[in-house]
Image: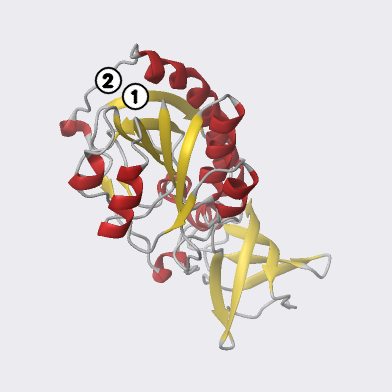
Amino acid sequence: MKIIFIGAVEFSHSALKKIVSVGGNVVGVCTYKESHYHSDYYDLSSFAKKNNIPCQFVDNINSSRSLEWISQLKPDVIFCFGWSRLLKREILSIAPIGVIGFHPSELPANRGRSPIIWAINLGLKKTASSFFFMDSNADSGDILSQKIIAISDKDDSRSLYDKITKVALSQIEEFLPKLEDGSYKKIKQDASKSNFWRKRTKQDGIIDWRMSANSIHNLIKSLNKPYVGAEFIYNKITYKVWSSELIIFKVRNTEPGKVIDVIDSAYPIIKCGDNAIKLIKIEPKLTMTKGIYL
């Protein structure tokens, strides 16, 4: 079974390594030479070169050049894991088995953008690792494999990304032989249970101290690395917050944004819309004193 692999993020690299390690016959790789869109961008060309796999840098996966390159390799299946643009029907119809995509959510729920970020931001208790047969719409095709993943209160985007990756790699090992011998099954998605998460904007990552402490804490966790970090502006300087801790603070006559304490001269506690939050890791370093307002 000949495989074309399309991807350009950390997960893409992990998945490609797994496929090759279990004997998958990858005959071509498409990736980005650079990306200003993916914060977890990963150039797959060095791995492809090391494993003697033809590799193509693409700007537009739907271009005639990309279409011709993929077609001439005559793939039986195409894997598209970690790609930000929809594939047009011309590419979707090249491989007899089809194009298999990946989405880290419990499809048909939570289709769309930034699923790991939104899951933590919104305080969800579970998500999933979902592989599906791509069609002309976003994340709507028949499901090949899906496994539920619990989200703990301690999870941030890094830990959840790694959890999902670990589960997804085990799924790949399970379904590759089924694709090869034709024993795989398709599960149709129930569109009536679907919703779409929108693309995040820069504004979504800005901390508003009038938010609840829990919402701010979730925001910070959701934007931890490999993503861009939650931020606030103080004295016209933008600060990134990478980790935090919830603090119970029930005094009602203290305004949001006030520094109510500083622990060990390094960890400020900020009053929020309700309760408070301790900032543990801030970049660049910011020395705060009790009583100032952010």
Contact (Cβ within 8 Å) of mark 2 with mark 1: yes
Disc sitting over residue 186 in the figure: 2
The residue labelled by disc 1 is 144
Where on the picture, by quarter, is residue 142? Answer: top left
Q: Measuring 50% from the left and 47% from the top, which residue is drawn there?
A: 54
Q: Give the structural element (helix, strand or loop) at label 1.
A: strand
Looking at this view, is 164 or 233 the one in front?
A: 164
Looking at this view, is 72 or 59 the one in front?
A: 72
Looking at this view, is 61 or 206 the one in front?
A: 61
Q: Give the structural element (helix, strand or loop) at label 2.
A: loop
State which quarter of the image contains the C terminus.
Answer: bottom right
- Outermost bottom residue: 236
Disc sitting over residue 111 in the figure: none
Question: Where residue 52 sits: x, y (%)?
Answer: 59, 43
- Can you see residue 207? yes
Judge whether 238 appears above or below 62 on screen: below
Q: Measuring 51% from the left and 44% from the top, which residue is drawn there?
A: 12
Question: Where residue 92 sits: x, y (%)?
Answer: 24, 41
For the residue carrying disc 2, how many other residues have a C-alpha within 10 Å: few (<14), some (14-19), or many (20+)?
few
Judge whether 40 appears above or below 234 on screen: above
Amino acid on which disc 2 is placed: Lys
Judge whether 132 appears above or below 159 on screen: above
